Image (cartoon, rainbow, N blue to C red):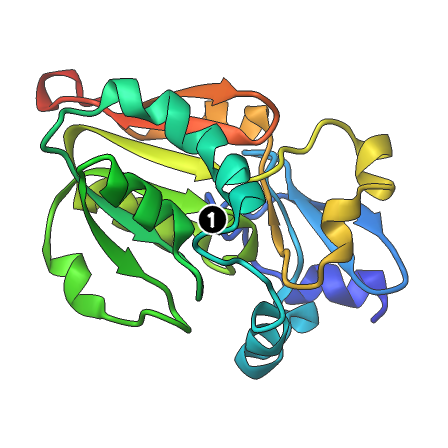
Amino acid sequence: MNINNLSKSISHCPLCTATGLQLYHQDKYRAYMQCTTCNFIFVPTSYHLTAEEEKKIYDQHQNDIYDQGYRRFLSRVMNPLLPKLAVSAKGLDFGCGPGPALAAMLEEKGFLINKYDLFYYPDKSVFSQRYDFITATEVIEHLADPLFYFKQWLALLKPGGWLGLMTKLVTNQRAFANWHYIRDLTHISFFSPQVLEYLSNCYPIEFEIVGNDVILIQKQHASFLK
């Protein structure tokens, strides 16, 4: 697609809804646009896979609940989250996939966990409840409408609750061009510390980045709402 035509076909940023957009990168597969307001980087919908194509890729993932390597990977978000949770905390593992290892790990710690996944655990009744914490590991980079889900997660969290995310963060434009993360065609949304800073100025949250791919976000108590 001609880049001029592409730019005209995109009306706004899917995260902050601003209309100022610029081409960030383009390869032989896709274009990547950046919002000049919030710095969010995204793949235009004209390049998105169908739901059927996405699921075929996810079905190939080998994420066994009892695989120790997978558990070590997930512990990078669980371990810093644990000290922030009460013993009786209730959580939602959003986008848990076919092998919900993190949910199992948290249940082993004594927490009550609900699971949701569009393809594998599509029980929407979990959205009628409130939670002390929500986890979404390697999820947000797959979301075409991150603003909808971000608002949904905040609405589901109790004041003071925690959102534990895992996603690799953009560092700079040069690194992005050679980044393995963009080679996965199911990855369409890319966050950076600048995007998180923008969100913290717009919503009642505070965040901390743990390592290079773990973000802990706290929904502020009502008395601290912005």
State left or right for residue 90 relative to residue 64: left
Residue type of the residue flagged with mark 1: Thr
User: Which of the image's four quarters has the N terminus?
Assistant: bottom right
Q: Nearer the viewer, residue 187 or 1?
A: 187
Up-down relation of residue 83 to residue 196 (above or below): above
**Picture residue at 63% right of the left edge, 63% below the top:** 186
* Position in image of residue 22 (x %, y %): 73, 45
Quadrant (top left/top right/bottom left/bottom right) for the C terminus: top left
Residue 68 place in picture, x, y as percent: 52, 43
The answer to whether residue 13 shows anywhere in this view is yes
Q: Taking 2 as reference, is 202 above or below it?
A: above
In the rendered structure, the answer to whether residue 24 lies left or right of residue 59 reads right
Residue 201, can we see it?
A: no
Along the line of sight, the residue nearer the viewer: 181 or 151: 181
Residue sitting at x 77%, y 28%:
172
Which residue does the numbered mark 1 point to in the structure image? 17
> How many numbered circles are shown?
1
Residue 42 in percent (x, y) is at 63, 51
Q: Residue furthest bottom?
A: 52
Q: Is residue 134 left or right of residue 42?
A: left
Say which quarter of the image contains residue 58.
Answer: bottom right
